[in-house]
Structure formats: C-alpha cells, structure tokens
Amino acid sequence: MKKVAFYTLGCKLNFSETSTISRQFEDRGFQKVDFQENPDIFIINTCSVTENADKKCKKIVKEAKKISPDSYVAIIGCYAQLKPREISEIKGVDAVLGAAEKFRLHELLGDFAKEQEAKVVASEISEATSFNNAYSINDRTRTFLKVQDGCNYGCAFCTIPLARGKSRSNTIASVLESAQEIASTDVKEVVLTGVNIGDFGIVEGKRQERFADLVFALDQVDGIDRFRISSIEPNLLTNEIIEFVSRSERFVPHFHIPLQSGSNTILRKMGRRYLRELYEDRVSKIKTLMPHACIGVDVIVGFPGETDELFLETYNFLNDLDISYLHVFTYSERANTRAVEIDGVVPMKKRNERSKMLRILSEKKRRKFYEENLGKTFTVLFEEDIDGGKMHGFTENYIRVAAKYDPMLINETKQVTLDYINEAGNVEVLEPEMVYEKH
C-alpha cells in the first residue's frame, strides 16, 4: 500500500478540493499519511494570489524531498495552471497538472512512476469548463463545501480567472446531496466556498439558478447546525439574502465582504463593480437587521496610483465603518494582469507601512466588536484546538472563545456567556453558565 501526503496552500476552496482528491486516493487503496511520515507520493495544491505564495510552493517541494528523497511529487492548483513549465523545472518535481486536469491524477499519472523529466499536463484555461464537486471532510471541525468555481469579473489585479477559468457552478440539487452526505458524518458547520459564490448558478455557460435560492434550499437541510457564507462580493450580496440570514436559524450572522479599497478612484482603476457607497449600504443593512453580526473585509494596499491621500480615504472609510476585522493584502505585481500597466507604482516600503497601519486598525476593530458582545449569550462550536489547558471555538458571529478543556465538548455546540477578553485576545466565558447540548 503506497503512502500519500497532501499539502494545501491558499484558500478554503483549495482545502475542499484537496480533501476530495485525497478521498480519490483512499478509494483506490492508498494510505493517507501526514507530511512527515515518509510518504511515497506528495500532492501539493498551490495558490498564486501573491508572489509569496509562489515562493512557498518551492519551499514545500524542498521540504518534501528532505523527508522522502525518493518520493513522487505532483503539483496542482492555481500556480500550476499559471506557470506549469516554471514549476516543472523545480528540482524534485515529477508532475504538474493544470486546472482541467487536477481531478484526473490517477488517469493521467498512472502508477506514479518517476521519469527522467517532469511530466506537464496543463491545458489552456479555456479547457477548464466542467465543475468538479468537492468538500472537505475529517480535516477540520467545519466542512468547506465548494458550490462555485472560476470568475467572469476580470479585476485588474487578479490572476484567478487565468488560473481557474470562467464562472461555473454546481446545481442546487447536487449541492443538497453533498450537504446531506456531510450531515451524515456529524459535521456541525458547513462553510460555502467558491471563487465568486454570489455568482452561483451558471451551468454550461448559462445562468440557470440563483445563489439566494441555494441559500433558501440549504436552510431546510436537517442535521447541520450552521451554514456560513464565505467571501461574497458586495454587489451580489442582496437585500433578499441579508434579510433571509437575519431570520434563519442555520445561516449564521457572519459576512466576509471584499472591499479592496475605500477610494472610488482606486475602485475604478481596479475594475471593481461597485463604489464605496454601495459597500457602506450593505454594511448598514446588515447591522440594522443584525447588530451583533460579524463583518470581515478584504482590502488591498499599494495598488498602482494609490497616493497618500487616496490611501487615507481608505483608512478613514474603514475607521468609520461598523466592521469587525480586516484581511489586509499588500499589492504585488502579477504577470498578465492589467494592473501592471497602470502608472503610479507605490514603493514597497510604503506598501508595507500602509499594511501595518491597517493591521493595527483591524486589531482595534476586532477588540471593539468583541467588547460590544461581552455579557451576551451565544452558541460556540468547540474545536480540537487546545492550548495551555484551554480549548477554543467560534460563536455563530465568529468570536473566538476560550474555555476550560473538556474532551466531551470537541465538535459539540454549547451555549456560553461571554465574560472578558484575555491576554491572547480571545474571549473567556462564564464556566458555571455553560450548558452542554447533545445533538
């Protein structure tokens, strides 16, 4: 029995796909092992959102060959689609598969026998037209369920359409089947993932269904306590969806909404499909209906043309906005994107200074959000995340909670009252008030 190990770089979508590919191996009699357990085969699922992600791929290959010098190393994922020839030249790489090929490892690589040169099987991205169903299982407390792939937006900074192709989706009926399979495994929380999940419903190039209807249908699935919507574009987060989530007992009050810039000038340069006024309206709508809702924000600093004044527009906009945390990305030049042709390159030192400012703002926003919810009662899903005798989990509105370790609580939900913020920045709970809930 050959041993196979997996390593995933990047987003929740990549995790869902790696998990599904790992089950393909197990179904064929391979033994899935940890990275350090001297595997015969390594499958590395790559990301290429930033230049740093590309460098990480090279480092993982190097580590894999240290652990198991005679192993077979196959690279899949976004970086593999964008730069297959470059990856094939990395010492130790045996195969590179593109977006249209990554779910066909066994068919294309046979018995994973090493050859004199690395095998490259990467079609043009226009060939990636089919939707491959995927979800993670047994990897984490929550499951990532892929419902959509690809993107038609073509933002100036983004390589994802080049790496994953055009927008395409699963069907509602198929997603419901997957959700029911997941429910049978005692998973308590499902995170809906995709490249642009609000664009759900395009099948074979034509819009056939709507994301809102998928949300309505999933809300009826028994056996899953929580559904969480991952990143969704502000122009696709409709009042209909927000209002439904505010009434739902399964869809949690947590929204992650990419902003990218608080300056309309920069948003236009980026080719985004909204202006800051619409974003502000989405946040206001959520907070009016769900004052306790958590709102996360993606923001890019240092985009070409971002002057000090325009960056301050972003900073002040975010400072005034009722949001809960930021994911801050430092702009990095990506080949074959429109952004590299835009004038006004921001020096890297300035990009890093701006990133630091926004990360400090994020910590302030998160702490304020936590403080606003102290004394209130929420339900926590506890994870196998133990540190210093404390176990951790998240409330429905994404507050990270610390509590006294109890092995019976792992992967269980429990009502808690939020007490105070500890030195690590997590919220401690009132132990006597906790009531164990069996499901």
Image (spheres, rainbow, N blue to C red):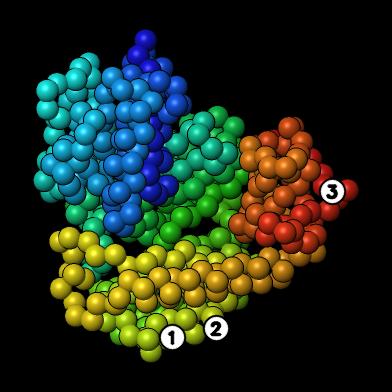
Residue 339, located in which quarter of the rendered image? bottom left
- Image position of 68 with respect to 172: above or below: above
Q: Position of residue 422 (x, y in %)?
A: 74, 58
Instruction: Say which residue label 3 marks.
Output: 431
Residue 215 at least partly seen: yes
Q: Amino acid at mark 1?
A: Leu
Q: Position of residue 185 (x, y in %)?
A: 55, 29
Determine the residue positioned at 80% across, 60% down.
Answer: 419
Q: Marks 1 and 2, Cα distance to the nearest angstrom?
A: 12 Å
Q: Is 68 placed left or right of 355 in the picture? A: left
- Image position of 394 with respect to 263: above or below: above
Q: Nearer the viewer, residue 12 or 171?
A: 12
Residue 410, located in which quarter of the rendered image? top right
Instruction: Say which residue label 1 marks.
Output: 312
Determine the residue positioned at 29% across, 65% down.
Answer: 332
Q: Amino acid at mark 3?
A: Glu
Q: Earlier in the sequence, mark 3 or mark 1?
A: 1
Q: Is 295 placed left or right of 4 in the picture? A: right
Q: Position of residue 248 (x, y in %)?
A: 59, 56
Mark in front: 1 vs 2? 1
Instruction: Say which residue label 2 marks.
Output: 320
- Image position of 263 with respect to 30: above or below: below
Label 3 residue SS? helix
Disc 3 to disc 2: CB gap under 8 Å: no
Mark in front: 3 vs 1? 1
Q: Earlier in the sequence, mark 1 or mark 2?
A: 1
Dot 3 surroundings within 10 Å: few (below 14), some, or many (20 or more)? few
Residue 206 at least partly seen: no
Disc 1 to disc 2: CB gap under 8 Å: no
Q: Is 299 placed left or right of 138 in the picture? A: left
Q: Amino acid at mark 2?
A: Asp
Q: Earlier in the sequence, mark 3 or mark 2?
A: 2
